[in-house]
Amino acid sequence: MFNSEKNYIDEWLKKQIKNGVSIINDVLEGKKDKVVYYTGHLHKDILDNFPGKTSKKIFKSYRVLLDNKTLAFTQKRFSEHGYEYMVRRVHEVK
């Protein structure tokens, strides 16, 4: 039975959020070029679909990758419903 007190957790969305880290790692390893690794509102979607400690672990996974100087991250708003988050490998580190 559906409990209206508890937030609904979207299993498909949880999979997409976790897959984003794998996609970024593929770019880091040179397996992919510039790609979209997530579509939506990443920060909000993580907070809405993962409880406290788990969301912190996911944010940390993304933070480590965002801090990597061999990757360039961009985002493009595609509608009021979200963004396309893209990553590409930078060939020259300055």
Image (cartoon, helix red, strand yellow):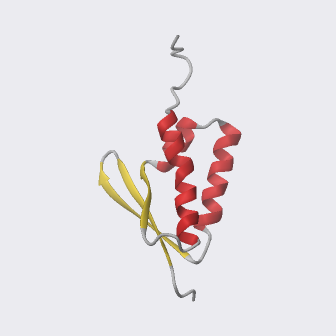
Where does the image place residue 89, in percent across and percent down from the top left?
A: 51, 76
Task: In the rendered view, tell whether residue 74 sits above or below residue 89.
Answer: above
Q: Which residue lies furthest to the front in this view?
A: 31
Q: In which quarter of the image is residue 36?
A: bottom left
* Quadrant location of the C terminus in the rendered image: bottom right
Residue 82 spot, x, y in % from top left: 36, 49
Q: Is residue 22 left or right of residue 87?
A: right
Residue at the (52%, 60%) spot, across then down: 23
Q: Nearer the viewer, residue 14 or 77?
A: 14
**Residue extending farthest right:** 53
Q: Position of residue 5 (x, y in %)?
A: 55, 17
* In the displayed structure image, the side of residue 89 where residue 29 appears, left or right: right
**Which residue is at 57% across, 48% downward?**
18
Query: Taking 29 as reference, is 60 above or below it?
Result: above
Q: Residue at x 67, y 55 (%)?
A: 60
Total number of numbered discs in the rendering: 0
